[in-house]
Image (tube, grey):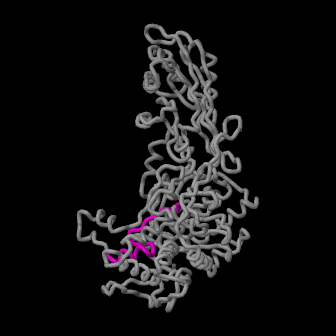
């Protein structure tokens, strides 16, 4: 027979304890107690548990025929004292100290940390060979708790017993105490995480109800571009992992599984997919520069609308009055759509199916170099790949309606500005812009190191460069210089940065407003700092938030400033956060006119 082990602890990058264990009193009973009605009746009376439930728990053999059965978890000191003082009346019953998870900061970094729960039969079937898990054990269900479950889980204690011919325990020969799991230190800086979480919550649900602020859901990711360390990852709405300690109630589970609650358990930073909108333009600019469809001298004429294919199907620039003659630099700065329609048209006609010489998916291939359309490989489960639409994808998607599956030039002009069928995650955008800033596509990670129970470092994460996109340095220079001017005219962004001593002239950034049929616009803001030798990148996405610069810009800039302040040691405040109430009010955001 075995005794569950306490799990290892989880700390942030600075050693702040984010997940700990709380000692509880667990009432156990030998299997033979199921044959003693009087003892079970007394247990029922003392613990306040109906007799049929007591009997069912003692008869449960899921953890082994001779194992002690858990009658009650988290018993009170009073109940334990009664059982100890009257042990002769509770033969075969004992009280054991065990541990359950405790999250001292509530919902802070909940989607990163995850939660635990009793192992299921399906999970038992996939247990690694080097791990011992029994029914009744607690395992990680999501987040870091799940991804590093093998590290956090300790080793069971053992109990050797002698049983009689009926299988009842008559003697305990020996007991070995359980060994606590090893501790995990994350790359998260809790003070920055707190800023990210509070900024986003105050924006979306200032009174606690979604729909009363700006937007309905959102995510913010902050990353160290030099090594891929995730400094903050905040998704909204959120939840308190403590809710799952001891098993979540059906009422709460039902509340969190409704459209009205906006599904608080979903980590939108890695599992939410959204149109990239104009944030895509950094990557499509680099593609145009590589193939000679753009350079630092060429200009285009923007009259506010465009029909470059002479199809009669006009596409608009967000500025309906037009930008006039404009080059690529200014096209990025003011986010002129016509510039990018022209680049997409050149790609389309240069494709082999149109009689050209390059791949029909040359533009998509260049975008993919920056990690879009594939998982980043972060150490969390549930990451989505997003989508870079291609002729093959469209044909397959419309296989049942072949007439809709043909690839047209308009598909490329939609894609080039991050619209149409494009889907990305907030994390992908952070990683992609990190590569634009540095030339290196880093693998994002949350694990900093693993320490044993003696405090000795056993494992340290090694930064991984996934790739160095094949981009001419002069092309990077053109795009980076333009990104350096995007936020100069945005007073709210400049003010948010100045609060932390960051000059808006020293950041590269891009805004975006993604249009979604039947919903409000998706607001985007991505920024990195400093322009020379970049250190931080922040990606902020607010669903149904409206304009990118107006809605996503200030909180994104605030989190960037918080990263800088935390590095200086000027940012230390961390407080517990509440989980989502599950409440929302009706929204009618509609689709506002784009400004980026």
The one nearer the camera, 87 or 538, is 538
| In-image side of 159 versus 522 (left or right) | right
Q: Residue at x 37, y 78 (%)?
A: 350
Q: Quick one: which residue is furthest to the top in this view?
A: 165
- In the rendered image, which quarter is residue 526 located in? bottom right
- Location of residue 520 in the rendering, given as x and y in whole percent from the top left corner: 45, 71
Q: Is residue 417 magenta?
A: yes
- Location of residue 60 in the rendering, given as x and y in whole percent from the top left corner: 43, 24
Total numbered circles: 0
9 lies above or below 237: above
- In the rendered image, which quarter is residue 418 located in? bottom left
376 lies above or below 447: below
In this view of the protein, can residue 555 be seen by the observer? Answer: no
The one nearer the camera, 287 or 276, is 287
In this view of the protein, can residue 41 be seen by the observer? Answer: yes
- Location of residue 502 in the rendering, given as x and y in whole percent from the top left corner: 71, 71
Q: Residue at x 38, y 83 (%)?
A: 315
- In the rendered image, which quarter is residue 223 located in? bottom right
Q: Quick one: which residue is furthest to the front in this view?
A: 357
143 lies above or below 427: above
Q: Quick one: which residue is furthest to the right in this view?
A: 569
What is the magenta range?
Answer: 408-427
294 lies above or below 584: below
The one nearer the camera, 38 or 246, is 246
Q: Which residue is drawn at 40% across and 77% down?
A: 347
| In-image side of 195 versus 161 (left or right) | right
Q: Is residue 89 magenta?
A: no
């Amino acid at each position: 027979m075995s005794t569950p082990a306490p799990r290892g602890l989880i700390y942030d990058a600075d050693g702040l304890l984010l997940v700990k264990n709380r000692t509880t009193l667990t009432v156990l009973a030998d299997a033979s107690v199921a044959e003693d009605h009087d003892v079970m009746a007394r247990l029922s009376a003392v613990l306040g548990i109906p007799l049929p439930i007591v009997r069912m728990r003692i008869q449960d053999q899921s953890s082994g025929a001779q194992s002690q059965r858990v009658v009650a978890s988290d018993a009170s000191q009073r109940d334990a004292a009664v059982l100890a003082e009257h042990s002769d009346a509770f033969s075969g019953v004992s009280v054991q100290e065990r541990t359950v998870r405790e999250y001292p900061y509530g919902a802070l970094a909940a989607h990163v940390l995850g939660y635990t729960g009793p192992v299921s039969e399906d999970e038992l079937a996939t247990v690694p060979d080097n791990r011992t898990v029994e029914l009744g054990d607690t395992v990680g269900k999501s987040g870091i708790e799940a991804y590093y479950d093998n590290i956090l889980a300790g080793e069971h204690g053992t109990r050797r017993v002698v049983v009689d011919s009926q299988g009842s325990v008559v003697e305990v020969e020996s007991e070995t105490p359980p060994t606590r799991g090893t501790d995990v230190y994350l790359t998260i800086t809790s003070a920055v995480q707190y800023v990210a979480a509070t900024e986003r919550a105050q924006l979306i649900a200032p009174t606690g109800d979604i729909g009363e602020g700006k937007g309905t859901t959102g995510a913010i990711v902050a990353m160290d571009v030099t090594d891929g360390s995730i400094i903050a990852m905040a998704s909204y709405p959120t939840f308190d992992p403590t809710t799952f300690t001891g098993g979540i109630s059906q009422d709460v589970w039902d509340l969190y599984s409704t459209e009205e609650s906006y599904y608080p358990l979903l980590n939108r930073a890695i599992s939410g997919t959204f149109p990239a909108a104009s944030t895509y333009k950094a990557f499509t600019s680099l593609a145009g520069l590589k193939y000679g469809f753009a350079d630092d001298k060429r200009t285009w004429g923007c009259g506010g609308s465009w029909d470059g294919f002479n199809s009669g199907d006009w596409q608009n620039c967000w500025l309906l009055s037009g930008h006039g003659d404009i080059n690529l630099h200014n096209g990025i700065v003011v986010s002129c759509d016509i510039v990018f329609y022209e680049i997409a048209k050149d790609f389309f006609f240069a494709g082999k199916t149109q009689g050209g010489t390059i791949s029909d998916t040359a533009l998509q291939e260049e975008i993919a170099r920056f990690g879009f359309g594939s998982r980043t490989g972060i150490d969390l489960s549930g990451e989505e790949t997003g989508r870079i639409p291609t002729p093959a994808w469209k044909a397959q998607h419309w296989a049942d309606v072949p007439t809709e599956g043909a690839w047209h030039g308009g598909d490329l002009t939609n894609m080039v500005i991050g619209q149409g069928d494009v889907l990305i995650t907030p994390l992908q955008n952070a990683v992609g812009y990190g590569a634009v800033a540095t030339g290196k596509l880093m693998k994002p990670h949350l694990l900093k190191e693993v320490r044993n129970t003696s405090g000795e470092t056993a494992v340290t994460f090694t930064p991984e460069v996934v790739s160095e996109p094949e981009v001419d340095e002069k092309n990077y220079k053109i795009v980076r210089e333009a990104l350096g001017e995007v936020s100069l005219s945005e007073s709210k962004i400049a003010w948010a940065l100045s609060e932390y001593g960051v000059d808006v002239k020293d950041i590269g950034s891009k805004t975006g407003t993604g249009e979604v049929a039947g919903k409000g616009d998706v607001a985007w803001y991505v920024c990195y700092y400093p322009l020379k030798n970049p250190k931080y990148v922040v990606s902020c996405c607010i669903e149904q938030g409206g304009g990118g610069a107006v809605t996503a810009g200030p909180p994104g800039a605030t989190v960037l400033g918080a990263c800088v302040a935390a590095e200086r040691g000027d940012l230390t405040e961390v407080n517990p956060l509440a989980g989502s109430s599950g409440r929302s009010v009706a929204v009618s955001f509609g689709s506002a006119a784009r400004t980026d």
